[in-house]
Image (cartoon, helix red, strand yellow):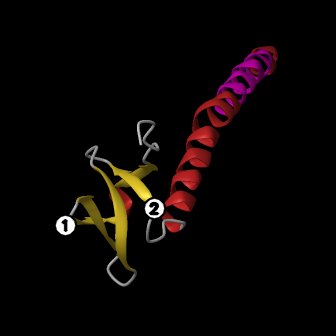
Amino acid sequence: MIQTISAQASSVPMIIMWVVIALIFWFFIYRPQRKRQQEIQNFRNSIAVGSKVVTAGGIHGEVRAIDEADNILTIEVAKGVNIRVDRNSVYATAPSDQNK
């Protein structure tokens, strides 16, 4: 009977340690990643015609048209050169040109 009580008592610190590790994982890894994903999604939803964007492939351009049904953006990358990309492949706004 004494062995059973000591075995249960020694497992309590182990359980507490795993709970602490899970909390650390939650606060330092999962939560910030989820917050960043939400920010990216909010950015993608706020893209409007005329926005300067950068795609996942590093292509800079200006949004010329948005097809909401297919979730596709038409981006002008050079004068008269338009490409169609999925909205989910846009990751950032293009930096403004300092030389102009």
Whole-number angstrom distance, CA of label 1 to CA of label 2: 17 Å
In magenta stretch: residue 37:
no
Residue 36 lies, with reference to residue 63, above or below; the image says above
In terms of secondary structure, what is the magenta stretch mainly? Answer: helix
The residue depicted at 19 percent of the width and 66 percent of the height is 80
93 vs 60, left or right, is right
Q: Which mark is residue 80?
A: 1
The residue depicted at 26 percent of the width and 64 percent of the height is 85
Q: Residues within 10 Å of mark 2 (few under 14, many from 20)?
A: some
Q: Which residues are magenta?
A: 6-22
Q: Which residue is mark 2?
A: 51
Q: Please tell me whether mark 1 or mark 2 is closer to you in this view.
A: 1
| Percent x, y of residue 33 | 56, 41
Q: Depth check: 38 or 58 in front?
A: 58
Residue 75 lies, with reference to residue 52, above or below; the image says below
Q: The residue tagged with tag 2: helix, strand or loop?
A: loop
Locate the N terminus and report the quarter of the image it occupies: top right
